[in-house]
Image: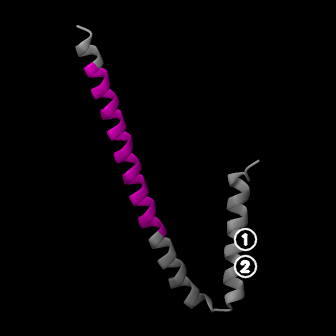
Amino acid sequence: MEKPITLKIKETKQNLVKALNESELPLFILEPILKDIYMETKAENLKQAQTDEYLYLKEIKGDADENNKNSSSGH
């Protein structure tokens, strides 16, 4: 059985907190590091969403084109 996403999220959060604590860096140093990570993650998420939308619309258009070809050849 694959590990549930809720457990993966919990473990990821725990691992991040552990890594931050073990870094022994003060919060004023950690804050910009976390901000950079957040901004990079946000940008990648946006790119993925755009790719997903493009591929979905391309697939729908392909299905519609295929249906049009099939209905045209049936006449």
Q: Is residue 15 left or right of residue 34?
A: right
At x 42% / y 53%, what residue is drawn? 49
Name the foreground residue: 62 vs 24.
Answer: 62
Q: Secondary structure at mark 1?
A: helix
The quadrant holding residue 29 is bottom right
At x 37% / y 53%, what residue is drawn? 50
Based on the picture, tell me whether residue 42 belongs to the magenta stretch: yes
Q: How many marks?
A: 2
- Three-letter code for the amino acid on which mark 1 is drawn: Gln
Q: Position of residue 74 (x, y in %)?
A: 27, 10
Looking at the rendered image, the quarter that the C terminus falls into is top left
Name the foreground residue: 72 vs 37.
Answer: 72
Disc marking residue 14? 1
Instruction: Please tell me how crowded label 2 is: few (under 14), some (14-19), or many (20+) other residues with Cα within 10 Å.
Output: few
Q: Which residues are magenta?
A: 41-69
Disc marking residue 18? 2
Magenta part, dominant SS: helix
Rendered position, 57 above or below 51: above
Residue lying farthest to the top in this orientation: 75
Q: Position of residue 11 (x, y in %)?
A: 73, 65
Instruction: Please tell me how crowded label 1 is: few (under 14), some (14-19), or many (20+) other residues with Cα within 10 Å.
Output: few
